Amino acid sequence: MKFSTCLFVASLAVLLAPTWRNAMAAVKVGDPAPKFSAPADNGTEWKSSDHIGKKILVVYFYPADLTGGCTKQACKFRDDMSSLTDLGVEVIGVSGDTVDNHKVFKDAHHLNYTLLADTNGEVAQAFGVPVSLGAKAVTVKVGDKEVTLTRLATAKRWTFVIDRDGKVIYKNENVKPEQDSHEVANVIKGLKK
């Protein structure tokens, strides 16, 4: 009786657990960047093909809007945007949050770059970033009111830099949120030498 109960509970836990997906092989340094598109925080469809070749792209994946590490990472990119722009960089943040969540996040922290809504995890999967599908909600205080944000996918925190030729020139799978923008800037400055 105990064995069958344990087996049932274990089976149920596997079925109810979020599913981590990594359908494609992870993109490596030197690989061509995958072509992708996703809804941007302004409601338009953002397409990589419209941006590759014009600027160096920083594409950073993060788990969720308005959470501790993600907010620190986003705000560091915001604070360093002037120097990154001087280096010819466009920053794109990608998470499984909705466009509406991104609007709240951008407004709350005055973010000055594009956030993409990868609600089905397809952009993360194209880069080989592990992503968990399933709705998760967080309630946070923004200004004087509480807001509940629900995301449909949760990606691991990874950062990629794509050069003007469309090749991945940098990949970090062990991102430290407060250091990410500085590390990216150093990599790009190294290209300019």
Image (tube, helix red, strand yellow):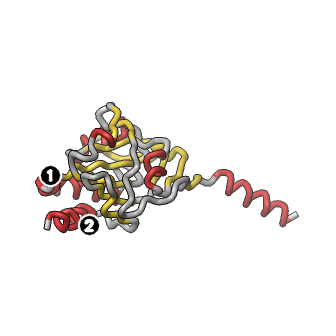
Within 10 Å of disc 2 (Cα), the crowding (few <14, some 14-19, many 20+) is few
Q: Quadrant of the N terminus?
A: bottom right
161 to the left or right of 97? left
The answer to whether the residues at label 1 and label 2 have Cβ atoms under 8 Å apart is: no
Can you name the residue that lies furthest to the front here? 165
Q: What's the residue type where badge 2 is placed?
A: Gln
Examine the image and state in which quarter residue 107 appears: top left
The image quadrant of residue 20 is bottom right
In this rendering, position of residue 172 left or right of residue 154: left
The residue positioned farthest toward the top in the image shown: 44
Separation of residues labelled 1 and 2 (CA atoms): 18 Å
Q: Nearer the viewer, mark 1 or mark 2?
A: 1
- Looking at the image, which residue is at 47% across and 56% down? 128
Tell me the element at label 2.
loop
Q: Is the residue 34 above or below the residue 107 in the image?
A: below
Q: Which residue is mark 1?
A: 85
**Which residue matches tag 2?**
179
Q: Residue at x 35, y 42 (%)?
A: 116
* Visible residue check, residue 143: no
Side of 70 where 193 appears, left or right: left
Q: In percent of the image, x 24 and y 63: which residue is there?
A: 184
Q: On the image, which quarter does residue 58 sit in?
A: bottom left
Question: Residue 26's spot in the image, x, y percent?
Answer: 47, 60
In front: 150, or 141? 150
Relative image position of residue 176 (x, y in whole percent)? 32, 67
Q: Earlier in the sequence, mark 1 or mark 2?
A: 1
What secondary structure is marked by label 1? Answer: helix
Q: Position of residue 167 (x, y in %)?
A: 32, 56
- Quadrant including the C terminus: bottom left
Graded by Cα atoms within 10 Å as few (under 14), some (14 to 19) or many (20 or more), the crowding at tag 1 reads: few
Closer-to-camera residue (144/44):
44
